[in-house]
Each structure stands twice: as structure tokens, then as C-alpha cells.
Amino acid sequence: MAPATTHNALARGGIIGGYIRVMDKLSRLSAYLACAMFIAGVLVICQMVFIRYLLGMSTSWQTEFTIFSVTAAMLMGSPYVLMTGGHVAITIVPDALGGMTRTIMRLIASLFGLGFCAALAYASWVYVFEALHGEWTTGSVWNPPLWPALLPMAVGVTVLSLQYVAEILRGEN
């Protein structure tokens, strides 16, 4: 992970600059958690291969755990990707227009992204609480509770929404 971004949050003072710095730190922390989740998924796959193919034993939880951990890694890493500009963007029209038009188009795109992520965050938290209070399970052989697998979605998209706000405030849309 790159320790620095192309942004200059230090140039902003006051509450806005403080918010941007806090969100940048939170997005980095989220990226480190995503890295740990991805590594856990890879290690469990290696353990599954060893158990299944070298020892000839069956596995019951490894595939499901890996799906959950790698998906969680993707969701928890998304705020860092937004912060560092690592997301895929097709910018041929705004770049060709340049100037104020480009700034406005990027701001509108950021507002749409924020709106989508905020709606997804709200729905994700509702889903987590329904799974928690309804005592939902995955229904598999392993059959763990479902809410821990859903929690990274809610947390990741919430932090992504907050990072969108930081990017809009940063003004480098």
C-alpha cells in the first residue's frame, strides 16, 4: 500500500481539513483490515487444498469462509481505492472538455456515487440487523450465523460513503 496519496489534506485547515484527514486515516485502516481478510482467505484455501487433496479428507467450512473473507476484503478496501484514485473511471469526455465543465461533471459523478453508496449503506445496515435479530444462518453444512458475513458490507460501504464526502470536500473531483 502506498503511504501517501496524491491529495493534500494538510493544506486544508479547520473542520473540513480535520474531517478529510480522519477519513483518510480510516480508509487506510480499512485497507489494512481488507488485506488481513484477503490473507485469511488465501491461507484457508491453502489449508483446504492440503486437507482435501493431500490428506483425502472432506472440508466443510473453508469454501464459505473464503468467499466471505475475500468479498469482505473487496468491500473494506473500497474506501482506500477511492481515496487513492485507484478506481476505474472513464474520463475521456470530462478530460476533453477541461476547465469548469470537467470540475462540474466530476462533482456530479461524485454526488451520484455518494447517493448510491449512502443508499447501499442504509440497506446494508438494515440487512445486518435483520440477520442478527432473526438469527439467520447461511444454511450450509457449516451453517454459521449470517450477520458476521454481512457486517463488512455495511461497514465498508459506510466508510466508502464517508470517503466520498471527504473527496467532494477535498475539491479534486
Image (cartoon, rainbow, N blue to C red):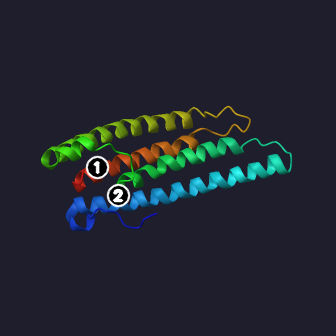
- Percent coordinates x, y for residue 40 in the rendering: 63, 55
**What is the distance, in whole Å, between disc 2 and disc 1 at their CAs?**
9 Å
Q: Amino acid at mark 2?
A: Met
Give the answer, above or below, for where 40 lies relative to 108: below
Q: Amino acid at mark 1?
A: Val
Q: Which structural element holds mark 2? A: helix
Q: Nearer the viewer, residue 105 or 98?
A: 98
Residues at marks 2 and 1 touching, judged by CB atoms closer than 8 Å: yes
Q: For the point 36% across and 60% down, which residue is it?
A: 24
- Percent coordinates x, y for residue 128 in the rendering: 51, 38
Q: How crowded is the residue under tag 1: few (<14 C-alpha within 10 Å), some, or many (20+)?
A: some
The residue pinned by badge 1 equals 165
Q: Nearer the viewer, residue 168 or 22?
A: 168
Q: Nearer the viewer, residue 20 or 14?
A: 20
Count the marks: how many? 2
Give the answer, above or below, for where 165 lies relative to 20: above
The residue pinned by badge 2 equals 23
Seen in the image, is 3 located left or right of residue 33? left
